[in-house]
Image (spheres, helix red, strand yellow):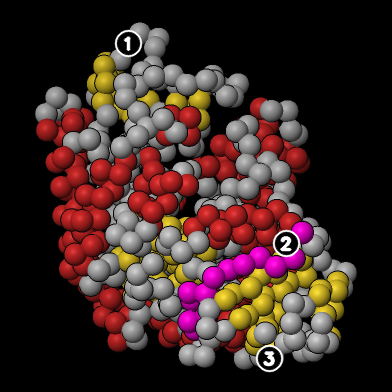
Amino acid sequence: MEIKWWHEKVAYQIYPKSFYDSNGDGIGDIPGIIEKLDYLKALGVDIVWISPCYPSPFADQGYDISDYYNINPVFGTLEDMDRLLAEAKKRDMYILLDLVVNHCSDEHEWFQKACEDPDGKYGNFFYITDKKEGELPCNWRSYFGGPVWETLPGHPDKQYLHVFHRKQPDLNWENPEVREEIYKNINWWLDRGVSGFRIDAIINIKKKFPFADYPVDRPDGLSSIQNMLKEATGIGEFLSEMQARTFGPHNAFSVGEVFDEKDEELPDFIGDGGYFSSMFDFSTTIFGGSPNGWYDRKIITPDDYKECCFHSQQRVGDIGYLSNIIENHDEPRGVSHYIPDGDLSLHSKKLLATMYFMLRGLPFIYQGQEIGMENLHFQSIDQVDDISTIDEYHVAKNAGLNEKEALSCISRYSRDNARTPVQWNDSANAGFTSGNPWLPLNPNYKEINVASQENDPDSLLSFYKELIALRKNPEYKETIVYGELIPYLEEQHNLMSYYRKGDKTLLVLGNFQKEPQTVKLPSACRKVLLNNYPELNISDDSVILDNYQAVVIEL
Ligand code: NOJ
Ligand code: CA
C-alpha cells in the first residue's frame, strides 16, 4: 500500500446543525465551528468532515442539496466557509465536505427545469418515466419507506425516481452531462481549499436497467433497494472517472460511504489508485440488521463486535486503509449501541474507545463521542425529527409491536440519538445555544459535558487525548498506523485482544464484561502504554483484567 498524507491522521465528524450555535438561532453554524477549532486541535484532531452545509430545504437534514455552490444561510456564508478553510489551514487542519451526488433536492434548479420541460436537457438529469395506469416501473422500496416513484410535479402522466425521500430525486449518472456538472463542482471546492470529501450513498448511483421487480420482502408489497443493487454492475466506470477527474489530480482525501462491496472489488475501491482513499467500515453498525426492519434486529454482543472488526480487518489487510467509527449522524451513540445494557460506565466507554481506535485504519470521532454522549430515550414519537426513525416506528407498529415496544426499538437505533446538540457545559441548553435548540438536548448534559471533562485527567475526553497522543507518538506511530493486525485469543469469550505488529509489537487487550478475567500473555510485557485503570495486575505470563479494563502494552 502506498503511503499517503492522511494515513497517520485523526479525523472528526461535525454535524453542523448540532455542533455549536454562535448566533442564538438554535442551529449550529460555521462561525460556531471556527470558534471550536482550538478545542478540536487540543484534542489532537487533524481532519474535520462537515456534514452538508449547503442550501437545502432540510427534508433530510441537508442531504437534499438545492445549490452545490453555496452555503445554507442558517450555517453562514461562503465567506464564513473561506474563513473556516483559512483558520483550519493555520492550524494544520484539513476540512472535508460531504459530497451528496446520488440525488439533489427537488428544489434544485435542475429539477425545477426538469419539471418545466421533462423532454428537455434537464429531464435527462433525472430518471423520469411515463406513467401507466395502476402500474409502477418497478417495486423498489425507498430507504425511507414507500415506493421509489413519485408523480412529477405539474405532470400527472409522469413519475421520477428517488431511492431516498421524495424530495431527493436521483441524478442520472448515465448522462455524461450530469457527471460533468458533478466533477466541475468537486473541483470548484477543491480549488477553494477543501482537502477532500466524504462521499454519500455512492453505491446507489448505478441502477440495474431496465427497471424490473424484485421479490417482495415486506407486507408493503415492495422490495429492498439492496436486491436491485446486488445486480447492478458497472459502477466502477463512473467511480474511476470521478477519481481521475477530481480527487486524483488534487491529491485529495476521499472516504466513501460504501456498503455491500464484494471482496474482489476491494482493490478497485480502496487499493492503490482506487476510486477512494478510504471507506468506512460499517461491519459493526449493520450487524444484526433484518430485512423486516429495526424491530427485528439482533442486538450485538461484545463477541459479535469483535468478530465484525476482525473480519473487516482481515478482509482489507494491506490492500487499503479503512476508516473506523463507532458512530456517526446515521447511527445511535456508539457507547449505547456496543456496550451491553446496564454496563455503561466510564471504564466501558474507555474500553470501547481503545478497541476501535487501535484498529488499523483512520479513526473518525463523531462529535460528542469524545465525552461519551449517550442515547436519548424517547417518551413519545412526537420527540422524533428524523424521517427514517418515523418510518421505522410505523413499520414496528404495523408488525404488531405496541406503543411502548415500538418506542423502545426506535430509541435503540434512531439516528436522532446522535443528532442532539453537543453538550459543551452544564449551563442552560448545555452551552450549545442561547436560543431554542432545534432538537432537544439529552437531559444528561448536567453530568456529561465538555467543560466538566476538560480539566479532569480521568475523564473520557482526557482518555481520547491519550489515545490520539499514542497514535502520534513517534516511537509507536509506524506500528499503530501501519502495523499488521493479528487477533489474539480470538475464541476467549468477552475478550477482545489483538496484536499490532510493525517495528514494535503491541498487544491491545479489552475485558468486555464486568467480571474480571485472566488473560495469558504470549511473552512478557515491556511497557504499559495505555490503561483505563490506575493499576494493572500483571505477571510475566498473564494479566488479570478488571471490570471493562482495557490496556495497550508493548511486548
Ligand atoms: C447517507 C447519509 O449519511 C444520510 O444521513 C442520508 O439520509 C442518506 N445518505 C441520503 O443522502
Ligand atoms: Ca446559528
Compared across the picture, whether 391 is left or right of 545 comes to left
Asked whether residue 159 appears in the rendered view, the answer is: yes
Amino acid type indicated by mark 2: Glu
Local SS, label 3: strand
Residue 128 in which image quadrant = top left
How far separated are the C-alphas under marks 3 and 1?
Answer: 72 Å
User: Which residue ends up furthest to the right in the rendered image?
Assistant: 515
Residue 200 colored in magenta in the image: no
- Disc 2 designates what residue? 490
User: Which residue ends up furthest to the left in the rendered image?
Assistant: 120
Amino acid type indicated by mark 3: Lys
Amino acid type indicated by mark 1: Lys
- Disc 1 designates what residue? 132
Q: Nearest to the eye among marks 1 and 2: give it.
A: 2
Q: Earlier in the sequence, mark 2 or mark 3?
A: 2
- Disc 3 designates what residue? 527
How far separated are the C-alphas under marks 1 and 2?
Answer: 56 Å
Residue 15 in which image quadrant = bottom left
How far separated are the C-alphas under marks 2 and 3?
Answer: 23 Å
| Residue 140 percent across, percent down from the top left | 45, 26
Q: Earlier in the sequence, mark 3 or mark 1?
A: 1
Q: Which residues are magenta?
A: 477-491
**Who's the residue at 54% across and 20% down the image?**
216
Quadrant where the C terminus sits is bottom right
| Circle 3 residues within 10 Å: few <14, some 14–19, many ≥20 | few
Q: Earlier in the sequence, mark 1 or mark 2?
A: 1
